[in-house]
Amino acid sequence: MTRRNEPAMREKNVLLIAGLALSAVFFLCLNKSAAEATSGPGPAPFRAGLRSSPYGPRHGFPEPPYWLAAARSMASRFERAAPTLVWIVGTMEKAAGAAAQKDYSGRVRLSFPAPGGAHVANIVFSAQDANEAYLEQFDRNGFQVWLQVEPANADVGTLIDLVLTRYARHRCVIGFGIDAEWHRWSRQHSAGMRISDAQAEAWDNRVRSFNPGYRLFIKHWLKSKMPPHYRHNLVFINNSQQFSSLLQMRSVFERWGKTFFPAAVGFQFGYPADRHWWKRLDDPALAIGQALRSSIPNTSDLIWVDFTMEEIWRPGVTREKQAALP
């Protein structure tokens, strides 16, 4: 019987294992590079920018250059802030012949066509895509974008699948947002239905199935509408308004920050209902943002609403020229 040359065999085995290891590293690097090419670097720890909705702008929906300039200007007010947009791609549908301001059908209208002409319960699709050209510009300019829906009575998991299947290839996308005011909305529950821990966890897992780096935000002004205990990967955004002063706003938002600490929190502000005091500030976006960041350490997002954005960032006007405006 021939005896094996054990030292030689060991050497071959070592070389084989080393070769396999190098191949594995090369394969992983290729996959990582491919993933980064489509998904981007992930959310920044701190973001500042604007909210965008189909119904918010007062003088027609602006072209991409306006959003680029305005969101950059907002972010430039805060050190190391990533320019960001909360980009609403699904809105509550008005009821047919609705007279009241808040009279809705219970369906959500998505601003892109149905995939394959699909019919989905409580979801209405648009004939044309309203977002693609904007997202391409945000990709090229290194922006970070939340894709948000007002879910109405549609299944939220289905909305996540529809939105992220269509847009997750964009580098700018960092996650998905739910405006809980419109979650299971009805006339009896005009501020939406409370989100349970089980729902929040299921939606979070669904979002991260598209990209492990994605995050989920839930937005409301009432803590009682938020999941009571689930915090993993969530950002809790407060969109309260009708404050008497910046001092009152900060006090209310401080309580929000403490409630969800150490989870990240964000704030949406600049509403017309608060214009009576913020219009007197030299730089409203800066003053409000600094007041909140200085007292709420877990702040991750500062977002000015589109209802009044043109009062701060007029089309074609740079930040340097704003001081000279009447």
Image: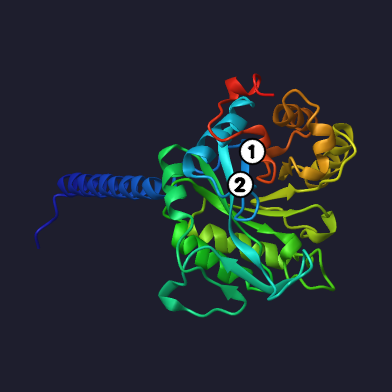
Three-letter residue code for mark 1: Glu
Q: Of residues 139 and 212, which is closer to you in this image?
A: 139
Q: Assess whether mark 1 and mark 2 are in contact (beta carbons under 8 angstroms).
A: yes
**x, y percentage for residue 9?**
17, 50
Three-letter residue code for mark 2: His
User: Is residue 302 visible in the rendered structure shown here?
Assistant: no
Q: Which residue is at 42% across, 51% downward?
A: 133
Q: Is residue 101 above or below residue 136?
A: below
**x, y percentage for residue 206?**
56, 64
Q: Residues within 10 Å of mark 2 (few under 14, many from 20)?
A: few
Question: What mark, if any, has residue 272 been given in the picture?
Answer: none
Q: Residues within 10 Å of mark 1 (few under 14, many from 20)?
A: some
Question: What mark, if any, has residue 310 been given in the picture?
Answer: 1
The residue under label 2 is 59
Q: Is residue 137 above or below residue 2?
A: above
Q: Of residues 23 and 181, which is closer to you in this image?
A: 181
